[in-house]
Image (cartoon, rainbow, N blue to C red):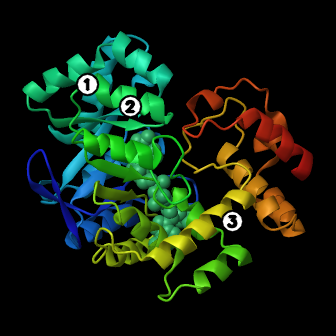
Amino acid sequence: MQYRTFNRTNEPVSLLGFGTMRLPRLKNGNIDETEAIKMIRTAIDNGVNYVDTAYMYHDGQSEVVTGKALKDGYRKKVLLADKMPAWFAKEEADIEKIFNEQLHRLEDQVIDMYLVHNIDKDIWKKVKEYNVLAFLEKKREEGKIKHIGFSFHDDFDFFKEIVDAYPWEFCQIQLNYMDKDFQAGIKGLDYAASKGLQLIIMEPLKGGKLTDILPESVEKYWAEADIKRTPAEWALRWVADFPEVLTILSGMSTMNQLEENIEILSDALPHSLTEKDHQIINKVSTEYNKLIKYSCTGCRYCMPCPKKIEIPAVINFYNEWFLYNGNDKIKADFKTWIPPKRRPSACISCNACQNHCPQSLPVSTIMGKASEIFE
Ligand SMILES: NC(=O)c1ccc[n+]([C@@H]2O[C@H](COP(=O)([O-])OP(=O)(O)OC[C@H]3O[C@@H](n4cnc5c(N)ncnc54)[C@H](OP(=O)(O)O)[C@@H]3O)[C@@H](O)[C@H]2O)c1
């Protein structure tokens, strides 16, 4: 495993971090706890020392399972990251309630890396209204958290404003070779680094979209490379190439993915991709951008839908329809996997989903278009 140094403490941080937003699931949708614990512990046994969870992942169960995985001596081997979802609070007192609930779920007393979660313009207003930062400083003084950072999903100008608004100790942005100019993007990475902030990267594989859809045109570009790599390897190495990156969170869902990502990040040094590698990656990125209609990463921040529509799955089918030239198999899969009561025609355009989408997707419009194709 490669390690980079956290500039606040000089601690080594593994280049692969474990994101617990996409843990393996059972058929009923609950986390497959046994497998998830095995995966988190295998990661730590192989040198991973950064584990990222949040209040809302897996409807609160991510924190619980992460807490269980970190028992039996594993907790002291990692930096544990968790986040304050200010948008869940209805009044200032809720901030403390949420924080206490997190410690309770994790069965822990200290959170090392604590982030203000998912900052965008609306959430930032709530952070100020409910004095979240003063609360976190108090918790830091009490020793309940060690470092204060933020995760971000808005545009570059607002990113600069947030970086400058507070003496943060680190920050977390979405970055992959398709999103280099999206949200904070590479400009944001450079700006944060110029202010001494190292970057935690989320969605390096665009939530799996850069690995699970491999159109022929993309495959053709990868084949041009001198060294043959899997799509996951290309995407992770692209992020690892930036020395400003402290750790790359991947939300691994299977043991095989974990094993592959450990291996990839065991020798990914900064600036190690060649000029030709970058040219190929740019061609792939342009091709995906042409093919993918709506850039959903399947993060599920839009859920639950009041009409119970399976929003991320519907958007995925919609994208696949175009990626595979309107293949009837996609229609058949839609009918098999999306039960009648969870289909897009139920959308009432309430936009509860849209307000929470980190990618700012026009969800109700997409539901209308998907309904026309599939229903
Ligand atoms: N703070 C925030 O606002 C925020 C937002 C988003 C994420 N996060 C954090 O950042 C973490 C990372 O983001 P992410 O989960 O979107 O990461 P990601 O690495 O972009 O996506 C993870 C998905 O990629 C696929 N994958 C991973 N390794 C693979 C491999 N070797 N080969 C093939 N496919 C592979 C899997 O999808 P399939 O199995 O479906 O193919 C997996 O579920 C999250 O888990 C979460 O902890 C934070």
Q: Look at the numbered disc 1 and give the secondary structure of its residue.
A: loop
Q: Quadrant of residue 356?
A: top right
Q: Quadrant of residue 116?
A: top left
Q: Is residue 326 left or right of residue 163?
A: right
Residue at image mark 3: 287
- Point out residue 56 in the picture as x, y percentages from the top left corner: 44, 38
Front of the two marks 1 and 2: 2
- Point out residue 197 in the picture as x, y percentages from the top left corner: 25, 42
Position of 168 relative to 266 (above/below)? above
Q: Nearer the viewer, residue 302 or 270?
A: 270
- Point out residue 43 in the picture as x, y percentages from the top left corner: 28, 68
Which label number is shown at residue 286? none
Question: At x 34% / y 60%, what residue is drawn?
Answer: 242
Q: Residues within 10 Å of mark 3 (few under 14, many from 20)?
A: some
Quarter that holds the N terminus: bottom left
Is residue 146 visible in the rendered image? The answer is: yes
In space, the residues marked 1 and 2 are separated at their CA atoms by 11 Å
Q: Is residue 208 left or right of residue 109?
A: right
Q: Residue furthest front?
A: 275
Identify residue type, mark 1.
Tyr
Q: Quadrant of residue 286?
A: bottom right
Q: Look at the numbered disc 3 and give the secondary structure of its residue.
A: helix
Residue at image mark 2: 160
In space, the residues marked 3 and 1 are separated at their CA atoms by 39 Å
In space, the residues marked 3 and 2 are separated at their CA atoms by 30 Å
Position of 173 relative to 308 (above/below)? below
